Image (cartoon, helix red, strand yellow):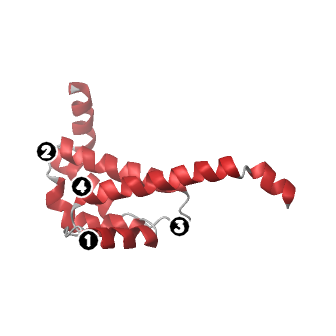
């Protein structure tokens, strides 16, 4: 652990720069262009990893929620954005509730990945190609 801290400190200079690099990443997310389940999963994992890193550095990510949630959610498909807004209103949550947002995104991404697995089981690519 000390070795990792030393390497990070050498690379970034100090804790504030490390924190800022995670925040910059999350604030500058680009929308997924062709949102396959795996791309959504990768995006979710990277966002979650950055938030966990901020937590590990002692940052209260909920305090950043009002800033980060509006940056994270548009990177996901419109349907997921709509579901977040509806869910937040129904549950009377602040739209910047980053913890609940990440929970919803985890469920959405997991559902998308599972649905893809089911489709592949029911309709393997080779069957579809041979029937066309």
Q: Residue at x 27, y 65 (%)?
A: 69
In the rendered image, which residue does mark 3 sit on?
33
Most foreground residue, 118 or 28: 118
Q: Is residue 102 left or right of residue 115?
A: left
* Label 3 element class: loop
Q: Who comes first in sequence, dot 4 or dot 3?
A: 3
In the rendered image, which residue does mark 4 sit on?
99
Mark 3 vs mark 2, CA separation in Å: 33 Å
Label 2 crowd (10 A; few <14 / some 14-19 / many >=20):
few
Seen in the picture, residue 4 relative to 106 is either above or below; the reply is: above
Mark 1 vs mark 3, CA separation in Å: 29 Å
Mark nearer the viewer, 2 or 1: 1
In the rendered image, which residue does mark 2 sit on?
58
Seen in the picture, residue 8 relative to 49 is either above or below; the reply is: above
Residue 90's disc number: 1
Mark 2 vs mark 4, CA separation in Å: 16 Å
Quadrant of the drawing holding the N terminus: top left
Mark 4 vs mark 1, CA separation in Å: 16 Å
Most foreground residue, 89 or 81: 89
């Amino acid at each position: 652990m000390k070795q990792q801290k030393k390497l990070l400190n050498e690379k970034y200079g100090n804790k504030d720069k490390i924190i800022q690099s995670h925040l910059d990443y999350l604030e500058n997310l680009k929308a997924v262009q062709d949102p396959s389940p795996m791309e959504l999963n990768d995006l979710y994992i990277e966002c979650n990893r950055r938030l966990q890193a901020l937590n590990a550095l002692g940052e209260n990510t909920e305090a950043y929620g009002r800033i980060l949630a509006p940056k994270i959610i548009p990177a996901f498909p419109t349907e997921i954005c709509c579901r977040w807004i509806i869910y937040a209103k129904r549950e009377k949550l602040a739209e910047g509730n980053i913890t609940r947002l990440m929970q919803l995104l985890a469920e959405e991404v997991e559902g998308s990945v599972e649905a893809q697995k089911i489709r592949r089981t029911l309709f393997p690519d080779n069957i579809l190609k041979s029937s066309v």
